Image: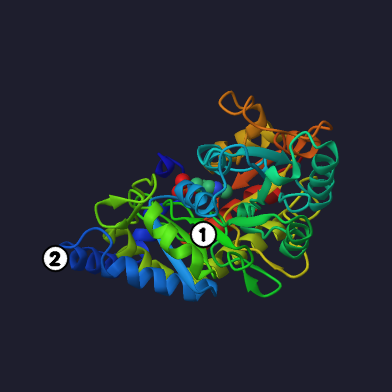
Amino acid sequence: MSRSFLVPQTDPGASYDAHKEEIDAAIKKVLESGTYILGKEVKDFEQEFSSYIGVDFAVGVASGTDAIEISLRAMNIGRGDVVFTVSHTAVATVAAIERAGAVPYLIDISPETFTIDTDKLEKEVKTCILKGGKSPGDLKAIVPVHLYGHPADMPTITAIAKNYGLHIVEDCSQAHGSECMNKKVGSFGEMAAFSFYPTKNLGAVGDGGMVVTNNPDYIEKLHALRQYGWENRYVSSFAGINSRLDELQAGILRIKLKYLDKENKKRREIAGSYTNALQGKSIKTPKITNNASHVFHQYVIQTNNRSDLISYLQSKSIATGIHYPMPIHLQPAYKDKILVPVTGLEITEEICQKIVSLPMYPQMTTDSINYVCEALNRWSI
Ligand SMILES: *Cc1c(COP(=O)(O)O)cnc(C)c1O
């Protein structure tokens, strides 16, 4: 579908083409090994990925959604517990919290970084504690989302968590390699979840996910949860699920991990070209805060003339996306299952009307980048 545009918005197929020989060899190796679930490739990838992030342990699971759910469950967070996150995110973040049995409490975002507004977060935590409606004991965790590849404000979030006794599970699904204060995201929280959905900065050719942590106490539980709750084979100590990263995906991800930094650098270069082309226009370009390293999973602009801009780019055969058009607190499946501040989610609702994601994938050719920049530069509104 994406290939029907001259410039697609994303292109996972191009990522295969770029590393075809190595990926084909990795696939063949797995097929011939005869081990397809929880073998050497998964073990090696867990080791390589944890060392890339700068943490001690990694546990491969079947998706990013599962990674968040399993992280929460490993901390015994579940029924009746409250977990703070944002409404402006992939629905998966909130779905995972809900599936763990907890109640998602959705906080507004900062209009600059699209990540959780830490002032509003602290205010809600305090209000909850004062109101006593939801008892302080029920407030369990924060799930900050490093949306579009920009890190959430982890120093402040860590301080809030410490102050109020909350756990942190980072949602790093869009931020493989992103840094805050020269430290990779995924190494701040007690646990962090990654997705390897094909279009992510590190993408498989199917579903995949990872939980990372520095705490050895969680490892046995994580291993058990991803496989039927087994602590010993065939004996379930508690109710687990089936959520395993498979050998084929792990073998392919091991190849792609080697190129992640180079590809993130390319994403930053594309972002730089867009920002230059948009100088002086009435379009708001993405900000990067001090101490942050952005990996541009998406390059998201804001405009009051969104539908005009999208049709204009479409007329030039340039595809765009909207990530995301409807905040989670307004979605039919979740609107009755979440908590929101009484003051509402003003910034979230406002920016949903204005955001557009431009084409962004590391295999974009110089010609394509120039073509998009030229089109943006000629945009006259
Ligand atoms: C992709 C994504 C997820 C979920 O990942 P899946 O692997 O599709 O389950 C969760 N959170 C965010 C922010 C994502 O972008």
Task: Establish whether ligand 1 lies closer than 8 Å to the Cβ of label 1.
Answer: no
Q: Which residue is mark 2?
A: 32
State whether residue 347 is above or below residue 219.
above
Name the foreground residue: 263 vs 350. 350
Quick check: 79 left or right of 205?
right
In this rendering, the label closer to the viewer, 1 or 2: 2
Describe the colour scheme in one phrase: rainbow
Q: Quadrant for the N terminus, please.
A: top left
Cα distance in 3D space between marks 1 and 2: 40 Å
Residue 369 at what x, y percent from top left? Answer: 56, 58
Observer able to see residue 6: no
Label 2: state its secondary structure: helix
State whether residue 173 is above or below residue 318.
below
Q: Are marks 1 and 2 in contact (CB under 8 Å)?
A: no
Mark 2: give few (<14), some (14-19) or many (20+) Cα within 10 Å.
few
Quick check: 8 left or right of 77?
left
The residue drawn where x is 72% and y is 54% is 286
Mark 1: give few (<14), some (14-19) or many (20+) Cα within 10 Å.
few
Quick check: 160 left or right of 367?
right
Observer able to see residue 88: yes
Q: Quadrant of residue 182?
A: bottom right
Earlier residue among tags 1 and 2: 2
* Disc on res. 242: none
The residue drawn where x is 53% and y is 71% is 53
Give the amino acid type for the residue marked by disc 1 in the picture. Answer: Asp
Residue 149 at what x, y percent from top left? Answer: 61, 58
Q: Which residue is mark 1?
A: 367
Give the amino acid type for the residue marked by disc 2 in the picture. Answer: Glu
